[in-house]
Image (tube, helix red, strand yellow):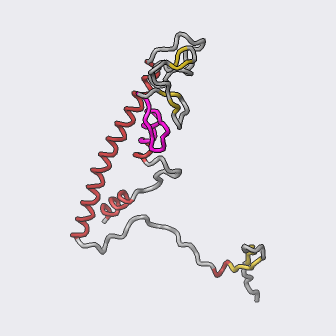
Amino acid sequence: MGKKKKKKKKKKDEEGMDNDIDTDDLPAIPPIHNVLIDLRTLTTEEEEVLQQVVEKDELETRALDKSVGAVRNEIEIIRSWAGKAKKNPNAKNPYYMGYMCVRCRRPLQIWKRPIPFVDSGKFCMHCMYRVCKFCRVEQNNGKYLCNLCLRLRQEKHLTGDWSDQGCAGLHSTDLLKISLQSR
């Protein structure tokens, strides 16, 4: 009696012309039902090798967690220095850091003049604060990072937070462990 009408979408191509596309001709995207890896075809030797890989990854993850913890401790120590360092009694605002190192509060200039034979400080390229030679590290490009910004950068590198997405979802070894346990 009645024929089914095909749904058509109009799509503009690169030149701006309308093209008719049959949506019935497009392949359907299959739903993801199971995230586990099918390990039924593995031999016992292959399974043992996979188990060794998972154990080695766990050891490396523990070592990485220790190094991340050490960097985080250093960050807390550097941040606590700012609270323990002496305030500038000569400034109207004792927390004004114009001619002092932000990290250790060493004077870099007196009366807006550089102290002879003393470091006048360089600006950190990330936080833009002036830091002394003891509280900064020179980068390959000739610019400087303060110790705090350097440690924060190391923490992001070690944890993988430097990328926009971060590590979302299961990691490959987590997926492998779950698949091995369910076998």
Residue that extends furthest to the bottom in the rendered view of this protein: 1
Residue that extends furthest to the top in the rendered view of this protein: 89
Picture quadrant of residue 49: bottom left
Please count the marks in the image: 0
The residue that appears at 47% across and 47% down in the rendered structure is: 161
Query: Is residue 97 found left or right of 50 in the rendered image?
Result: right
Q: Is residue 165 above or below residue 69?
A: below
Picture quadrant of residue 16: bottom right
Range drawn in magenta: 134-154
Tell me residue 13's x, y (percent).
Answer: 73, 74
Residue that extends furthest to the right in the rendered view of this protein: 17
Residue that extends furthest to the front in the rendered view of this protein: 116
The residue that appears at 36% across and 57% down in the rendered structure is: 174
The residue that appears at 48% across and 36% down in the rendered structure is: 144
The residue that appears at 36% across and 70% down in the rendered structure is: 38
Tell me residue 175's x, y (percent).
Answer: 38, 60
Query: Is residue 2 found left or right of 152 in the rendered image?
Result: right
